[in-house]
Image (cartoon, grey):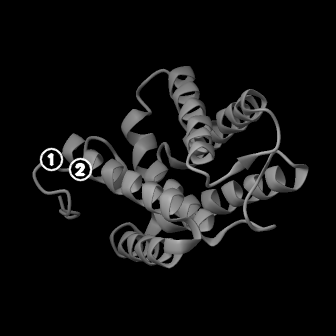
């Protein structure tokens, strides 16, 4: 189970790096890889795809609001295409991560998710993918609060979303074995 989750985590991190470091220059590669990931998920875990799409839409809406209230900005006046792909990749990752960590204390999961989300924007800022229009500390604090709220939603949506994701049913031997 942990080997499977490690592979999923590494794939998400690779997509994150490609999106944030490549931005518009490599956005079509990012979108292509995210599309392949979503197609694979649709074939393997069809019940999860709707939830993934819903979470991605909520995340994009949140970023759209942040963009228009002036929390941060991009080189374009709208959400960049690579960020849209990144939201789908994150929602996909969360669909696996939440069931793995849902046995931990909820406050720990919410806090870790909020910290990770806020720090990912800070890292994006450091790499030049997003510009904070507020002070760095203020923007990161607001993002932490938003991600804390988002983590509540993630737990609700993905905790028991699909028996395929149940920690006890994922095979360590063959992460592609869905008929276990």
Q: Is residue 54 left or right of residue 139?
A: left
Q: Is residue 163 visible?
A: no
Relative height, residue 145 to residue 156 (above, below): above
Q: Disc 2, disc 1: CB below 8 Å?
A: yes
Place residue 143 in its image quadrant. top right
Disc 1: CA contacts within 10 A as few (<14), some (14-19) or many (>=20): few
Disc 2: CA contacts within 10 A as few (<14), some (14-19) or many (>=20): some
Q: The residue tagged with tag 1: helix, strand or loop?
A: loop
Q: The residue tagged with tag 2: helix, strand or loop?
A: helix
- Location of the C terminus by quadrant is bottom left
Q: Which residue is mark 1?
A: 172
Q: Is residue 4 visible?
A: yes
- Location of the N terminus by quadrant is top left
Place residue 83 in its image quadrant. bottom right
Q: Is residue 76 left or right of residue 115?
A: right
x 36%, y 76%: residue: 43
In the rendering, which numbered label is found on residue 123?
Answer: none
């Amino acid at each position: 189970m942990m080997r499977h989750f490690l592979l999923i985590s590494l794939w998400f991190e690779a997509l994150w790096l490609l999106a944030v470091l490549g931005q518009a220059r490599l956005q079509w590669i990012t979108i292509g890889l995210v599309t392949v990931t979503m197609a694979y998920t649709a074939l393997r875990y069809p019940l999860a795809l709707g939830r993934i799409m819903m979470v991605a839409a909520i995340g994009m809406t949140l970023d759209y609001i942040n963009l228009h209230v002036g929390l941060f900005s991009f080189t374009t006046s709208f959400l960049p295409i690579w960020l849209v792909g990144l939201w789908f990749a994150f929602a996909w990752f969360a669909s696996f991560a939440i069931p793995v960590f849902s046995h931990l204390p909820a406050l720990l999961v919410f806090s870790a998710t909020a910290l990770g989300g806020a720090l990912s924007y800070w890292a994006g800022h450091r790499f030049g993918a997003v510009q904070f229009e507020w002070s760095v500390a203020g923007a990161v604090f607001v993002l932490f609060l938003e991600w804390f709220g988002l983590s509540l939603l993630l737990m609700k949506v993905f905790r028991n979303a699909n028996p395929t994701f149940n920690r006890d049913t994922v095979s360590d031997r063959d992460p592609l074995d869905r008929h276990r």
